[in-house]
Amino acid sequence: MALRTLFSKKAFTTASGFRPIAAGDRCFLRQARGLTVAALPDLAYDYGALEPAISGEIMRLHHQKHHQAYVTNYNNALEQLETAVAKGDASAVVRLQSAIKFNGGGHINHSIFWKNLKPVNEGGGEPPHSTLGWAIDTDFCSLEALVQKMNAEGAALQGSGWVWLALDKGSKKLCVETTANQDPLVTKGANLVPLLGIDVWEHAYYLQYKNVRPDYLKNIWKVINWKYASEVFDEETA
Amino acid sequence: MAMALPLAYASSVVHPFEAGRLSFSTKATKHKKQIYQFRKVTKVLAYYGLTNPPYKLDALEPYMSRRTLELHWGNIHRGYVDSLNKQLANSPLYGCTMEELIKTTFNNGNPLPEYNNAAEVWNHDFFWESMQPNGGRLPWGGVLDQIEKDFGSFSNFRDEFVHSAMMLFGSGWVWLVLKTNERRLSIVRTSNALCPLVWGDIPIISLDMWEHAYYLDYKDDVSKYVNNFMDHLISWHSATARMVRTEAFVNLGEPKIPVA
C-alpha cells in the first residue's frame, strides 16, 4: 500500500516527507531506495534584488544553471557511488571521489553563498555589530582592513575558487582563507567554519564586470548579509 | 609567438661639465653644450610584446564574438603581458625566450611567481593560432594519419577531446599534444596556467576552457562552445605546420619508402 503511494504522481507532490526535485522519476526511485539526495535551495530574494551590485542575469544563471548542475551531477555521482560500494568496486569508488568533491563542494559552497547575500533594502551591506563586530576588530583591526584583505586575496586567486571569512572552532579566531575550484572550506582545516564566502569563479561576475574582478569584489560588500555571519559566529562561539 | 622586441628604453643623463669649469657663452659653444647634453647614454631593454591574432577580431563570428576577443585578447591577454614585463623588469630571469622562461619558472612543479604570467602569455598566443576563420571539419594528410594511428579514428579523437573538455573541473586548457617520450598524439587536460611544454611535450592544438573564453557567447553551455570549436574554429592548418616542425624533434616512425 505504501509502495503504491510512493509510485503515484499525486503522492510525490503531497507533503510525504520527501523534498521535491526537478529530475523527476529517477530521484523518486533513489528516495524509495533510501538514498538522500541533494536539492537546489531556493533564494530568499528575487534574482534582480541584488542589483546593481550583482545583475539579475548573473543571479539567474548562477542559481538555475550552475548550482543546479552541481546538484544534478552530485546526485548522479552519489548514485554511482552507492552502486560501486554495494558491488565492492573499490576502483570505481575512488574514481568517483573527484566528481563528488567537485560537485558536492559546489553545492555546499553555493548554498552558503546564497545565504551570504541579501538585498540592500533588507539589510544587505549593513556592517556587523556586537560579537562578530568586536571579533573582527580584534583579529583584523577594523572591518575595512578585513574587506581589503579579502578583496586582495580574492583578486590574487589564480583561476577559479572562493575567498572565505572563516572561524577556527578551536582557537575561536577569525581568519581569511581561499580555496581552489569548488573545494569546501574544510579542505583548508577541519576546524574551519565558513561565515562568509565570495565566489570568484568567472561565472559569478564576468557578464557584468568582465575581467575586472576587483570591481566585483568592491561592490559585492554592498549586499553581504552580515546578519547570517553573526548568527553562525554566535552559534559556534556559544 | 611572443617575441622579445625592443619596446622600451631606459636612459641616464650624463653630465659632462664639472663645476667651476670656464665656459664661454658664445653661440658655437652653447650649441655644442646642448648637443653634448642630449647625447644620453641609452640602455636598450627587451620586453615581451602582445602579438596580434592572425585574423581580425570579428573573423571568428558567430562562434566566437568580436566582443569576446576584444576582452579576452585586448584586456586579459594584454594584462598578462604587462604583468610579466613588470615582473621581469627587475628579475634575474630577464632575457630568456618564452619557452625557456616557462620551463625555468615552472621550477619542476614549484612555480616561481613569473610562471603564471609567462605561461598564460604563451598559452594565449598558441590558442589564437590554434583557431582560424572557416576552421574545423577534418584534418588531412599526415595529421589525419597520425590521429587515426593514435586514436583509431578521427571521430574517436573528437569524442575524447570533447569529453576531456567537459570533464575539466575549474579553469584550464585542453590540449592535443605530441608526447615526446611515447612518440604519439595524446589529449591532455591542464589546470589554470599549466602548459604541456613543462613536461617536454609538444602541443599541437589547444582550447581555452577558462570561463572568460566562452561565457559572453555561450553562458553556461560549455558543450556548445566545445563542439563549435571542433566544428568551426580549430585550425588544422596550424596543426599541420606544428606537426611538421615536431617531426624535426621526434621520430614518429619509419617513413614508408616504396621498394623498387
Image: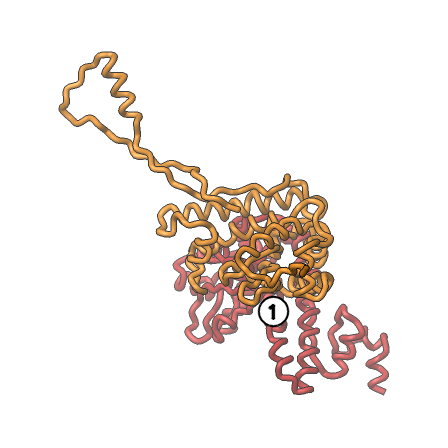
Q: Residue at x 44, y 76 (%)?
A: A170
Chain name for mark 1:
A
* Residue B121 locus on image (x, y percent): 51, 50
Check the image and report above or below for A36 versus B14.
below
* Residue A67 locus on image (x, y percent): 66, 64
The chain that appears orange in the image is: B
Tell which of A215 and B37 is nearer to you.
Answer: B37
Residue B259 visible, this angle: yes
Q: Residue at x 31, y 25 (%)?
A: B38
Query: Which quarter of the image is occupied by the N terminus of chain A?
Result: bottom right
Left or right: B252 in relation to A39: left
Tell which of A103 and A233 is nearer to you.
Answer: A103
Left or right: B44 in relation to A232: left
Tell which of B57 and A161 is nearer to you.
Answer: B57
Q: Residue at x 45, y 58 (%)?
A: B103
> Mark 1 packing: few (<14 Cα in 10 Å), some, or many (20+)?
many
Q: Which residue of the protein is positioned furthest toward the top in this rendering?
A: B27
Give the colour in which the image draws chain A.
red
The residue pinned by badge 1 equals A102
Quadrant hosting residue B66: top right
* Residue A189 locus on image (x, y percent): 47, 73
Quadrant hosting residue B22: top left
Residue A144 visible, this angle: no
Say how the picture is coloured: by chain
Q: Given the image, on which type of amino acid does mark 1 rest?
A: Phe
Tell which of A94 and A150 is nearer to you.
Answer: A94
Numbered circles on residues, count: 1
Check the image and report above or below for A8 versus B121.
below
- Secondary structure beneath disc 1? helix
Q: Which residue of the protein is positioned furthest toward the front in this rendering?
A: B260
* Residue B220 locus on image (x, y percent): 68, 57
